[in-house]
Image (cartoon, rainbow, N blue to C red):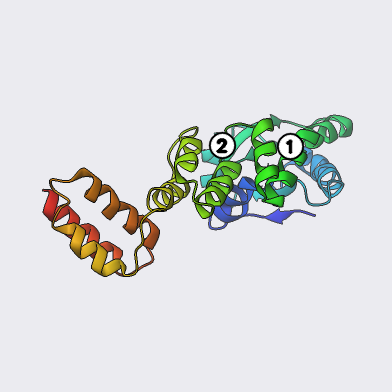
Amino acid sequence: MSIDVTEATFQTEVIDRSSTTPVIVDLWAPWCGPCKTIGPILERATDATNGKVILVKVNVDENPGISQAFQVQSIPAVYALKDGQVVDGFVGAYPEHVIEQFVQSLLPTEEENALVALIEAGDETSLRAALELEPGNEDAIVALGDLLVLSSRGEEALALLARIPESERTRKVAAAARLSQTVIDDYDAQLTALLTRVKADEEARQEFVDILELMGNDDPRTAGYRKQLTARLF
């Protein structure tokens, strides 16, 4: 089974989906004879993975923008994506056994399956075992960081987060880690008190930013407090 994708749905069905499941993009056109040959082969091969590899089809005549993005010069053109990036592909018609090998190569290895299972288990022992397999795995580091914060081991959480580049997810855990020893009963009262000190006091400024990080951008107060911080600093 395949999914027909257009320029309007490409982001959701291909780029976003590939963050969790490998996606094969089959670029074809109704007038392309070889496309009609490999299309059913791709469907059989991906169906055999039971959803572990997704097949999408793009009609290049109807979606020239996607064709241009892949810099397609001839079809059939087939590309595999993981985490939004092209990791493999081929152009032209190939025998069934070659296409099957192409699809099978996208399946997770035993180690990758073990890593996913350990992260999904979510306890400290499992997460540490996951980091033995992949020391820089962001999912495992963020999950373990959360557990360390909950058990009042903020410094250990910060050391763990230092292993990987900063991201929106790590900033939130780091903020919670730095504030783990601080009792905050009222965000508004605390932020108002800190605002008078942020220009000259680096610790106050960091605490102010950390509280905003915990509040998150969905909190209607956050944007206003960020503006007040900017006004005080500059």
Q: Residues within 10 Å of mark 2 (few under 14, many from 20)?
A: few
Residue drawn at (76%, 34%) of the image: 111
What residue does disc 2 label?
70
Q: Nearer the viewer, residue 229 or 196?
A: 196
Q: Quadrant of the N terminus?
A: bottom right
Instruction: Residue 106 in the image: state x and y as whole percent.
Output: 75, 36
Q: Which of the numbered marks, if any, corresponds to residue 112? A: 1
Q: Give the residue type that dot 2 points to.
A: Phe
Q: In this orientation, does residue 63 appear?
A: no
Which residue is at the front of the view, 65 or 180? 180
**Where residue 41 sits in the image (x, y, percent)?**
85, 42
Q: Does the residue at mark 1 contact the one at mark 2 (Cβ under 8 Å)?
A: no
- Residue at 75% in and 53% down: 2
Please state if 173 lies on the left or on the right of 84 as rendered: left
Judging from the image, what secondary structure is the residue with disc 2 in?
loop
Residue 8: image location, x then y, percent: 53, 58
Q: Locate residue 216 relative to residue 89 in the image: left or right.
A: left
